[in-house]
Image (spheres, grey):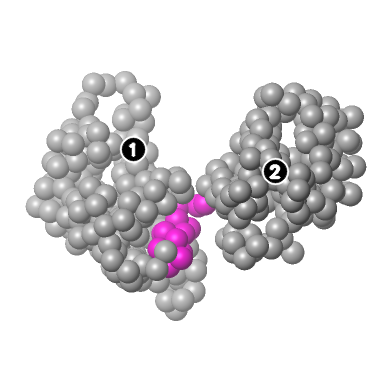
Amino acid sequence: MAKSASAELKEITAGNLKPVYFLHGNESYYPAAITKKIIEVAIPEHEKGFNEFILFGKDLNIGAVLNNARRFPMMAERQLVVIKDADLIQDIGQKEAQGMLEAYVKDPLPSTILVMLFNKSMDERKAFVKAFGEKGVLLNSKKLYDNQVPDFISQICREKGYKISPKAAQLLFEHTGNNLESIVKEIEKMAINLGDNAEINGEVIEKYVGISKDYNVFELQKALVQKDFGKCFQIVNYFGANPKDHPIQPVILILYNFFSKVLLVHGARGKNDINLASLLKVNPYFLKDYTAAAQKYSSGKLLLIIHTLREIDKNSKGIQGGTKVESDLYKELIYSILQ
């Protein structure tokens, strides 16, 4: 069974390197992180000048890749050949070239580590791609679903020696979306300013990332659950005054996902908390928000809210015409939900 990306990183960090790596997918963080770690540990610093080669696909054909891979290291145990932008190799789509690459991968030179880093998902049904999985590492890094991102944030924080509260993880997710590279950069930025074993909470997020712990989409969501008119309009007025930092479309997406899951709660009567959290694909810590909302909003009202969110999303994108600014759309949204 193929290892996870995080498990591969641990293997590489421990010095357990494979002769060939095929790194691809529509999420760039893990392929880039694995490549970076291989470059860091594979070749000692004093040998890099002679035995480390970082090449780019657009400048190469498969023949050139293999010539580099078959070269013996100079006065060293091994060499490293990294091909970045491998999807741009001139003949990578040609059957003959693929056959040549497959033949090498099935019998790789033991003294060479060949890393091929692609900028997109490749077809793993191809024989030459499968060969990498048999002789080395074949990793397809896929975009995380939104509900998986807070767990990723918690995992990265643990690896760096920090605790992070579920609320803080949600705040960071709101700010970055599911861009894993941006998430890690923000965590590293906070780490520079924190001591060892510190806890990342709402105050830390507000101070170092620049997200208000009081005026964010999750506080808006909480105010909507409580049907707190004053707090809701306080938050959306703040959003409307800062549209660059709080564009409406990501807010609509988060609220749409929230209320859609609240609707699921109505159809899941009798399930215990563990099963309900699994059904909704949420951290059990936040389950009370969904069950509380289900008590406040009937299934009929939830269907109207979901319809309203779709309509305002269209308006925000200009699909249905009109000249409303985001601040007006925010107010219309709150009126529609709370009326």
276 w.r.t. 81: above or below = below
Q: Which of the 4 quarters of the picture holds residue 269? A: bottom left
- Provide the residue designation for mark 2: 51
Amino acid type assigned to the residue bearing label 2 in the image = Asn
The residue drawn where x is 36% and y is 67% is: 162
Where residue 134 sits: x, y (%)? 82, 55
Q: Is residue 3 left or right of residue 250?
A: right
On whether residue 152 falls in the magenta region, the answer is yes
Q: How many marks?
A: 2
The residue drawn where x is 78% and y is 26% is: 61
167 w.r.t. 212: above or below = below
Amino acid type assigned to the residue bearing label 1 in the image = Gln
Where residue 199 sits: x, y (%)? 29, 68
Q: Which mark is in front, 1 or 2?
A: 2
For the residue pair 114 and 158, the one nearer the viewer reads as 114
Q: Is residue 185 visible?
A: yes
Q: Which of the 4 quarters of the picture holds residue 116? A: top right
Where residue 91 sits: x, y (%)? 79, 25
The residue drawn where x is 83% and y is 29% is: 63
- Mark 1 vs 2, N-terminal side: 2
Q: Is residue 38 visible?
A: no
The residue drawn where x is 25% and y is 38% is: 245
157 w.r.t. 48: above or below = below
On whether residue 53 falls in the magenta region, the answer is no
- Provide the residue designation for mark 1: 249
Q: Secondary structure at mark 2?
A: helix
Label 2 crowd bin: few (<14), some (14–19), many (20+), radius 10 Å: many
Range of magenta residues: 144-159
